[in-house]
């Protein structure tokens, strides 16, 4: 858009980093905040600044956390013997919301993708292997997405578990092939979680 304000143009450009937000939506958002909700805009700016500054990754599970160890890992109320491995923090949130799972997590922050240069190191596999070696984990639930790369990652995880002598299970039917856990409806995800199967 033609704008007399470079700051407005910068705001619109910046808003476009949000998923699903194109030029038109970004312009509408910027205008809305300036015209009708400056207080909301200030709050958004402050929250963004704080979040970007202080949210890192838990040293134990790699999920988002503003502490060295996240509240979930630090909780006394969670089972210690079950570890669910997911690709992203969004997948973890989906499982927390859809299932009654009360165990531990490990977040890969990605999936094996040799073409993109994402190997076991980038996914924290050495740390995961070390954790499996601690002797606390009895079962590893592999909850990677049923995509080609997710399956390759699951295969790698299965071998990691086998090497540590730990039972590995995989989410069952219901999660559509090529689907993403984050977008699967809750009852389907809960069902797939409950019906997980042993990995060969
Ligand atoms: Zn954690």
Image: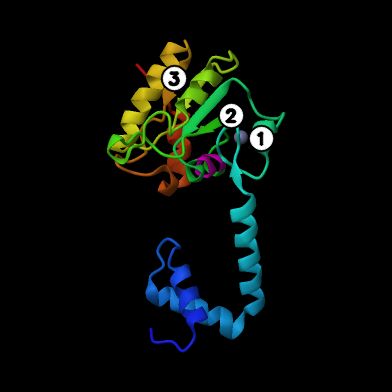
The stretch in magenta equals 92-96
Which residue is denoted by mark 3 in the rendering?
168
Depth-wise, is mark 3 or mark 1 nearer the camera? Answer: 1
Secondary structure, mark 3, is strand
Classify the position of ligand 1 by quadrant: top left, top right, bottom left or bottom right: top right
Q: Quadrant of residue 114?
A: top left
54 lies left or right of 106:
right
44 lies left or right of 197:
right
Estimate the spatial distance between the alpha carbons at disc 3 and disc 1, rounded to whole Å.
25 Å
Q: Earlier in the sequence, mark 2 or mark 1?
A: 1
Q: Are marks 3 and 1 in contact (CB under 8 Å)?
A: no
* Residue furthest to the front: 6
Which residue is denoted by mark 1 in the rendering?
69
Q: Quadrant of the C terminus?
A: top left
Q: Earlier in the sequence, mark 3 or mark 1?
A: 1
164 lies left or right of 55:
left
> Residue, x 62% and y 53% (percent of image)?
53
Residue nearest the viewer, comparing 126 with 176: 126
Estimate the spatial distance between the alpha carbons at disc 3 and disc 2, rounded to whole Å.
14 Å
The answer to whether any part of residue 198 appears in the image is no
Residue 131 drawn in magenta: no
Which residue is denoted by mark 2 in the rendering?
104
Respond yes or no on whether mark 1 lies under 8 Å from ligand 1.
yes
Q: Position of residue 64 (x, y in %)?
A: 58, 43
> Residue, x 55% and y 21% (percent of image)?
131
Secondary structure, mark 2, is strand
* Residue furthest to the right: 76
| Numbered marks: total | 3
The answer to whether any part of residue 145 appears in the image is yes
Q: Which mark is residue 32?
A: none
Q: Quadrant of residue 143?
A: top left
């Amino acid at each position: 858009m033609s704008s007399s304000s470079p700051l407005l143009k910068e705001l619109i450009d910046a808003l476009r980093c949000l998923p699903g937000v194109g030029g038109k939506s970004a312009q509408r958002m910027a205008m809305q905040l300036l015209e009708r909700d400056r207080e909301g805009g200030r709050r958004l700016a402050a929250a963004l600044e704080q979040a970007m500054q202080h949210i890192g990754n838990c040293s134990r599970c790699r999920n988002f956390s503003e502490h060295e160890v996240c509240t979930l890992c630090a909780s006394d109320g969670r089972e210690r013997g079950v570890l669910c491995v997911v690709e992203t923090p969004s997948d973890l949130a989906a499982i927390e919301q859809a299932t009654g799972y009360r165990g531990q997590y490990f977040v890969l922050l990605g999936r094996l993708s040799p073409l993109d240069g994402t190997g076991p190191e980038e996914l924290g596999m050495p740390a995961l292997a070390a954790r499996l070696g601690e002797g606390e984990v009895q079962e590893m639930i592999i909850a990677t997405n049923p995509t080609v790369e997710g399956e390759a990652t699951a295969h790698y995880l299965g071998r990691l578990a086998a090497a540590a002598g730990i039972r590995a299970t995989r989410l069952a039917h219901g999660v559509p092939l090529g689907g993403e856990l984050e977008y699967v409806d809750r009852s389907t995800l809960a069902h797939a979680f409950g019906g997980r199967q042993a990995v060969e």
